Amino acid sequence: MVPLSVPFTIGPGVIGALLVMGGSAATAAEKMIDISGIVTAVLLTGIMLFVGNWIEHAIGRKGLNILSKITGLIVAALASQIIFTGIKNFLFSK
């Protein structure tokens, strides 16, 4: 189970976000904020992986399917926003 979860939790999107965050942090305070955000995300991901069986038991198979579809919708909306923002910045940059 664990080797299957690694590509989903640490994929190309996470690596890209970390590179952008690391390159844009100029001061020590910004770096500490970035590090605290990463630590929080890692802890929350670990907690979710740890209590995953309990969540599955609590909401059932249909609940997981619904949650999966809602999460996919949110990710698709975020991806669309990123694409449209990139196109807008490319077309209307000075």
Image (spheres, grey):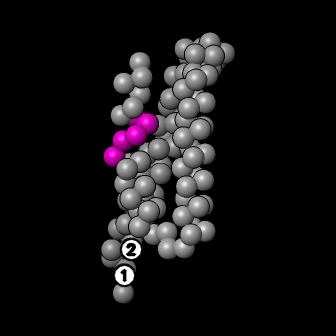
| Residue at the spot of label 1 | 93
Can the viewer see residue 72? yes
Which label belongs to residue 89?
2
Q: Nearer the viewer, residue 51 or 59?
A: 51
Q: Residue at 37% of width from left, 54% of height from top?
A: 16
Secondary structure of the residue carrying tag 1 is: loop
Q: Answer few, some or many: residues within 10 Å of disc 1's Cα (few below 14, many 20 plus, some between 14 and 19).
A: few
Amino acid bearing label 1: Ser
* Vertical order, 61 against 48 (above or below): above
Residue 23 horizontal/vertical position (percent) = 41, 67
Amino acid bearing label 2: Asn
| Magenta-span inclusion, residue 10 | yes
* Range drawn in magenta: 8-12
Residue 19 horizontal/vertical position (percent) = 38, 59
Contact between marks 2 and 1 (CB within 8 A): the answer is yes
Q: Answer few, some or many: residues within 10 Å of disc 2's Cα (few below 14, many 20 plus, some between 14 and 19).
A: few
Residue 6 horizontal/vertical position (percent) = 39, 31
Q: Is residue 79 left or right of residue 37?
A: left
Q: Quadrant of residue 54?
A: top right
Can the viewer see residue 63? no
Secondary structure of the residue carrying tag 2 is: helix
Q: Residue at 42% of width from left, 51% of height from top?
A: 79
| Magenta-span inclusion, residue 70 | no
Q: Nearer the viewer, residue 37 or 13?
A: 37
Q: Residue at 58% of width from left, 23% of height from top?
A: 50
Q: Residue at 33% of width from left, 46% of height from top?
A: 12
